[in-house]
Image (cartoon, rainbow, N blue to C red):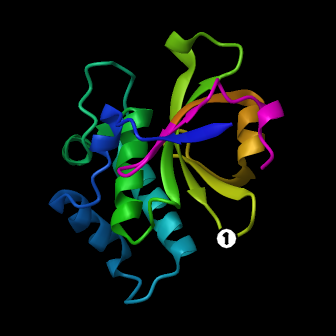
Amino acid sequence: MLERTSQRFKYMDYVTPEDDCVKEIATRIVKSKGRRVEKSTIVELVFSWIKNNILPEGSSPEKDLRPCVTLRKRQGTCLAQSILTASLLRALSFSENEVWVAVTLHRGESPFEAMHAIVILQTSDKGKVIALDTTESLLEVTTLNEIIQTNTILLMFNDKFAWVPKQPLHSSQCDA
């Protein structure tokens, strides 16, 4: 079970929808679609833009995770790409209750080799979420319960809130 925490995590400061570089790219991504763009289309446009413009980069604790750096280098780790994706979606009218970055650990693997980051979007369909994995080119509608069948969620965050498990989240603890 996840609980919202008042504790600030450094990763939260990297989700920056208000940065000029993020707002500029966000505007460019949706500009061709006209004035009113449905949220589902925005998700597809951002996902496609990240896949086509940001190359995956190997993990390293020294990497700069700021979206403007990822945009300038045109490459980033799964965490950097997820932070950029969340920043773009937040800049494009998604609320802090709709989009967050999830840091996960694949079950049965070493945390030094299997930690991964994805973006999770809340949908209007009760219990359903959209999981965006830009480094694996995967966009799927699923549930948190399905995600935690093979992964442990270590942390979920955006620029406003963080959620941490009371203990690592396992499938038996999720009702979604």
Mark 1 lies on residue: 124
Q: Is residue 128 visible?
A: yes
Q: Is residue 135 visible?
A: no
Q: Can you name the residue that lies furthest to the bottom here?
A: 35
Q: Foreground residue, 50 or 5? A: 5
What residue is rendered at 26% in x and 42% in y?
A: 70
On whether residue 167 falls in the magenta region, the answer is yes
- Which element carries disc 1, helix, strand or loop? loop
Q: Can you name the residue that lies furthest to the front here?
A: 6
Is 40 above or below relative to 5? below
What residue is rendered at 43% in x and 48% in y?
A: 161
On whether residue 3 falls in the magenta region, the answer is no
Q: Is residue 176 left or right of residue 22?
A: right
- Residue 43, how many percent across, how many down? 51, 65
What residue is rendered at 51% in x and 60% in y?
A: 97
Q: Foreground residue, 8 or 106? A: 8
What residue is rendered at 52% in x and 80% in y?
A: 38
- Residue 40, how many percent across, how many down? 57, 72
Residue 33 falls in image quadrant: bottom left
User: For the residue marked with disc 1, what is the amino acid?
Assistant: Ser
Q: Is residue 50 left or right of residue 67?
A: right
Near mark 1 (Cα within 10 A), the count class, few <14, some 14-19 or many ≥20, is few
Is 45 above or below relative to 149? below
Q: Which residues are magenta?
A: 156-176
Q: Which image quadrant: the N terminus?
A: top right
- Residue 139, how many percent across, how many down? 61, 53
